[in-house]
DNA sequence: CAAATGACCAAATTAGTATTTTGGTCAGTC
DNA sequence: GACTGACCAAAATACTAATTTGGTCATTTG
């Protein structure tokens, strides 16, 4: 009957953070949701922030997993990058927890939450940077600074997925792939017909 | 002795908005700074927002002027776009009023101020969009959707000028020009040596 | 006796309120 | 009749009381 208490706590906290965000989640509430005395939480986690840390760590792992799944070795660099980036940002856009977190980080500005946002973004960056590095090695793309390149890729996708549709009809996944190809891969030069 | 009262008011208000932002600027203060009774302001402007409107309109005009100055017909499209975009974002970054406004819009979220931010961004977009349209006509670049293209240009420059240097050493004007050339104009395909 | 608990506490938040300030008006001045 | 500043309702702020919160630890429980 006595399930793994730690797992219960993490599960309950994940649900609460997803539903109410970081600030509005109280340790009392987590304890009740987890059917556990409040003190018990503190035998597994030093404090609220560390509990949140672990949950974000899980989230990042899930997101990386989703991105990795989107990649298929026999497809080209371009197609893989598109699938992976789209997947990660879709993830960020659809999962309750990321929605709440990014929202809270932006409008309330909780420092703990902002750190986590940065962590998530940094993780996406590393993932893409690695792919770019490999593509350069394999001469699939022109040589370039992998960090700046990954940075540009991500900023472009975020712009298309989040910013563009704040005042315009959203772009489909295919449209975004085309734009990525046109602007970043092909380039605008050479008006050859 | 009795200078143009309206001009005085605008001048005083500009100074106050630049110094304290929209919310923290009071009509009493503007009146005092302009050496004018408070009621007088309301003979020229319906309310605080309209006064602010006019000042932002001036700001936009100045910014467009700066951008237009950066353009020289005998230089290529690429160089001109770079100079114009850089100039506008530099303007936004250096002018007391834009700094205050964008800051207040972000952290306090005053609706009036956010509208103005949007207005400024929309204006930059139109300016660039027009340049892109002309470049396509003249076959200086590959055919493409001018709005999306202008959007990408701006997002990329904002990323490089504002976002990149939040956690990394800033990029020089030349570096940004090179990156713009590499990613958008040339493209990453074809690893020709 | 080790693991779990919840009453407990200082510190932080929030709710409630009195006070001040603000955008805007308009009767009166010059 | 252009201009003013005392005036007002509404909004913002400062202040305080009351509540809630993260975290602890003496006590209980299995």
Image (tube, coloured by chain):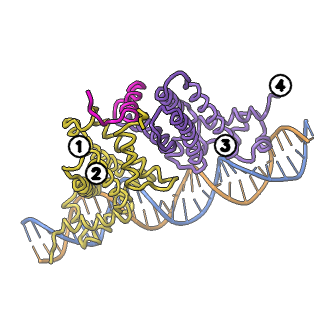
Chain colours: A yellow, B purple, C blue, D orange
The numbered dot on residue A131 is: 1
The numbered dot on residue B53 is: 3
* Residue B100 colored in magenta in the image: no
Q: Secondary structure at mark 4?
A: loop
Q: Distance from label 1 to label 4 (Cα)? A: 70 Å
Label 4, on which residue?
B1
Which chain is indicated by disc 4? B
Asked whether the residues under marks 1 and 2 belong to the same chain, the reply is: yes
Asked whether the residues under marks 1 and 4 belong to the same chain, the reply is: no
Closer-to-camera residue (B60/B50): B60
Q: Distance from label 1 to label 2 (Cα)? A: 10 Å
Which chain is indicated by disc 1? A
Dot placed on the residue nearer the N-terminal end, 3 or 4: 4
Q: Residue furthest top?
A: B74
Which chain is indicated by disc 3? B
- Residue stretch rendered in magenta on the structure: B168-193
């Amino acid at each position: 009957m006595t399930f793994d208490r730690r797992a219960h706590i993490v599960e309950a906290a994940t649900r609460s953070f997803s539903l109410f965000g970081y600030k509005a989640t109280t340790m009392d509430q987590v304890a009740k949701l987890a059917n556990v005395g409040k003190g018990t939480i503190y035998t597994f986690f030093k404090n609220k922030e560390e509990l949140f840390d672990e949950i974000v760590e899980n989230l990042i792992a899930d997101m990386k997993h989703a991105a990795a799944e989107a990649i298929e070795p026999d497809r080209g660099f371009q197609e893989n990058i598109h699938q992976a980036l789209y997947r990660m940002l879709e993830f960020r856009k659809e999962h309750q927890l990321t929605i709440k977190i990014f929202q809270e980080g932006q409008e309330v500005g909780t420092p703990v939450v902002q750190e986590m946002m940065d962590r998530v973004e940094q993780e996406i960056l590393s993932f893409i940077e690695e792919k770019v590095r490999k593509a350069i090695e394999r001469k699939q793309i022109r040589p370039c600074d992998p960090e700046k390149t990954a940075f540009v890729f991500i900023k472009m996708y975020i712009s298309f997925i989040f910013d563009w549709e704040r005042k315009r009809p959203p772009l489909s996944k295919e449209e975004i792939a085309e734009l990525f190809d046109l602007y970043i891969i092909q380039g605008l030069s050479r008006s050859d017909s």
